[in-house]
Image: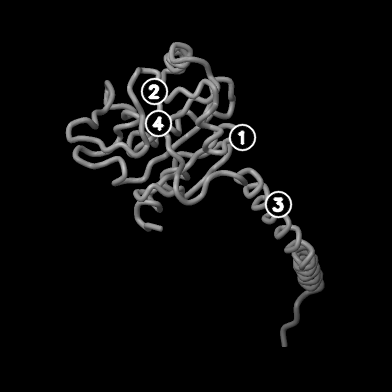
């Protein structure tokens, strides 16, 4: 009968010892740690979104930096939904197909500020979302139309913004920090709330969900 050599037995014992150590390393103590991390993340999300509107979205009507009027509930007429020069970001109010109404698709409402570094970091994500979805960009406490226009031009952003110089829209929406994002569905209900940096695909996924699965 063939028997393992002494060297092979030693290697086998070492492998078994390593396996035992790894098994012990991932016992309930680590599962508990992972659970605590998840709980902290969920708790942070809850804390960040506390007080933000749920259900029916608050009214949102105001002037943009280009002088046009934004109304979250406004109907959009045929031929009004035009892409901006070069086919880049679509109009913040009219980023829907011709003939559709403002309530025929989900809308992303995003509150941001010129002085917010996180807002600057994610601005490309918002512009990207606006190419395929309706986006209402709200410049909170960032000065008058001229100031916001200057900022957008310096940043190379063609997406107009609703001016919220005194923060009244932000207060009405319960916004305490920026950036804050809301996904409003076709029925005018707030379906998702995201505080802090948001990815392009994360926002698009939420918009798709709101459009595909009515509340």
Residue at disc 2, secondary structure: strand
Q: Residue at x 45, y 44 (%)?
A: 57
Task: Give how far across and how far down residue 139 sits, in percent.
Answer: 49, 25
Residue on which the image places disc 2: 63
Task: Tell me how far mark 2 sits from mark 1, CA to CA.
Answer: 21 Å
Residue at disc 3, secondary structure: helix
Residue at disc 1, secondary structure: loop
Q: Quadrant of the C terminus?
A: bottom left
Closest to the observer: 171 or 115? Answer: 171
CA neighbours of label 3 inside 10 A, class few (<14), some (14 to 19), many (20+):
few
Residue on which the image places disc 1: 176
Q: Residue at x 39, y 23 (%)?
A: 63
Residue 11 visible in the displayed image: no
Residue 66 visible in the displayed image: yes
Task: Tell me how far mark 1 sits from mark 3, CA to CA.
Answer: 21 Å
Residue on which the image places disc 3: 40
Residue 61's label in the rendered image is 4
CA neighbours of label 2 inside 10 A, class few (<14), some (14 to 19), many (20+):
some
Q: Residue at x 53, y 19 (%)?
A: 142
Task: Tell me how far mark 1 sits from mark 4, CA to CA.
Answer: 19 Å
Q: Residue at x 58, y 24 (%)?
A: 116
Closest to the observer: 94 or 169? Answer: 169
Relative vertical location of residue 34 with respect to residue 205 in this rendering, above or below: below
Q: Quadrant of the N terminus?
A: bottom right
């Amino acid at each position: 009968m063939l028997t393992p050599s002494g060297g092979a037995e030693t290697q086998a014992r070492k492998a078994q010892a390593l396996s035992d150590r790894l098994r012990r390393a991932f016992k309930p103590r680590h599962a508990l740690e992972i659970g605590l991390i998840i709980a902290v993340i969920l708790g942070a999300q809850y804390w960040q979104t506390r007080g933000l509107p749920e259900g029916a979205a608050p009214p949102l009507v105001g002037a943009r930096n280009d002088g046009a009027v934004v109304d979250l509930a406004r109907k959009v007429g045929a031929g009004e939904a035009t892409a901006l020069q070069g086919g880049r970001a679509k109009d913040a109010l009219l980023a829907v197909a011709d003939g559709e109404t403002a309530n025929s698709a989900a809308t992303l409402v995003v509150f941001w500020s010129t002085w917010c570094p996180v807002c600057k970091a994610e601005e490309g994500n918002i512009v990207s979302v606006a190419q395929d979805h309706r986006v209402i960009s709200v410049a909170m406490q960032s000065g008058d139309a001229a100031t916001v226009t200057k900022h957008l031009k310096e940043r190379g952003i063609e997406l107009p913004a609703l001016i919220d110089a005194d923060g009244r829209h932000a207060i009405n929406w319960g916004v305490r920090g920026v950036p804050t994002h809301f996904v409003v569905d076709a029925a005018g209900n707030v379906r998702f709330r995201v505080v802090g940096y948001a990815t392009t695909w994360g926002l698009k996924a939420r918009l798709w969900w709101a459009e595909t699965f009515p509340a």
